[in-house]
Amino acid sequence: AQSVTQLGSHVSVSEGALVLLRCNYSSSVPPYLFWYVQYPNQGLQLLLKYTTGATLVKGINGFEAEFKKSETSFHLTKPSAHMSDAAEYFCAVTMNSGGYQKVTFGTGTKLQVIP
Amino acid sequence: KAGVTQTPRYLIKTRGQQVTLSCSPISGHRSVSWYQQTPGQGLQFLFEYFSETQRNKGNFPGRFSGRQFSNSRSEMNVSTLELGDSALYLCASSLTGGPTGYTFGSGTRLTVV
């Protein structure tokens, strides 16, 4: 079975500071990994994804994430937080299950950016 | 290209009524998934349809049902509404599911009074 753990349901950073949102997964086979962002009263928007190849993936809005197989982690980072980054972020893992892809979402981390 | 369209955007229903929500996926996408999102439970998977067939289902009571049409548009229905069904219902479409990721609609905010 696959699972996703996001450490910290709420994270606060100052504007201009480093953003680090943590995601650990468990999967019995190589997974596909995703980060999504959700703004209030909106659906989720894909930020970035890891499927194969380079373990450091870059996404939209200056975010990036590194797949570390040995640590089963896929943490999301951004060097300098902007006020517009305030939102909820979801990590997701997809793996093959019974012939099709099954996706599991984490519980989400709300990012607050303090001016 | 047009995104995922969910209608209606907001809905208020009375306990005991039923409701139907609609989702039009991105053109060419054959997989449509539905999620319920609440502050207490987070994102919960309802079901996924692919080429008109339900291929995965979450742990929701039988009052929650769905279907997908030949043009990939999908509907979900909730019968005998309860107060606890108040939530944001999200639809997500994908080419085939899996590595391509999902494109979400803006959701339907259902309030049951």
Image (cartoon, rainbow, N blue to C red):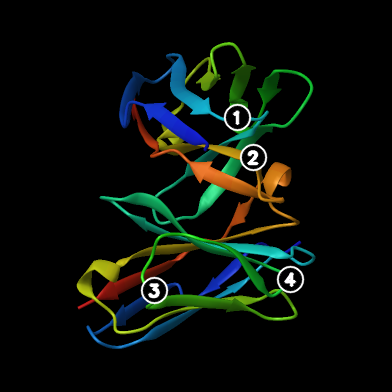
N-term mark: 2 or 1: 1
Q: Is residue A17 left or right of residue B55?
A: left
- Answer whether labels 3 and 2 touch (C-beta < 8 Å): no
Residue A101 placement (x, y as % from top left): 67, 48
Q: Callout 1: few (<14), some (14-19), or many (20+) C-alpha neighbours within 10 Å? A: few
- Chain letter, disc 4 residue: B
- Chain letter, disc 2 residue: A
Residue B57 placement (x, y as % from top left): 51, 62
**Residue at figure coordinates x 36%, y 78% from the top left:** B11
Q: Which mark is residue B74?
A: none
Residue that mark 2 sits on = A95
Residue that mark 3 sits on = B10
Residue that mark 1 sits on = A28
Q: Secondary structure at mark 3?
A: strand
Q: Is residue B70 left or right of residue A92?
A: right
Look at label 4 and name its amino acid.
Answer: Ser
The answer to whether residue A20 is above or below residue B111 is above
Q: Secondary structure at mark 1?
A: loop
**Residue at figure coordinates x 54%, y 71% from the top left:** B6
Which callout, 1 or 3, points to the residue nearer the camera? Answer: 1
Residue A38 placement (x, y as % from top left): 46, 45
Q: Is residue B62 visible?
A: yes
Alpha carbons under labels 3 and 4: distance apart: 28 Å
Residue that mark 4 sits on = B51
Q: Callout 3: few (<14), some (14-19), or many (20+) C-alpha neighbours within 10 Å? A: few
Q: Nearer the viewer, residue B104 or B47?
A: B47
The answer to whether residue A88 is above or below residue B95 is above
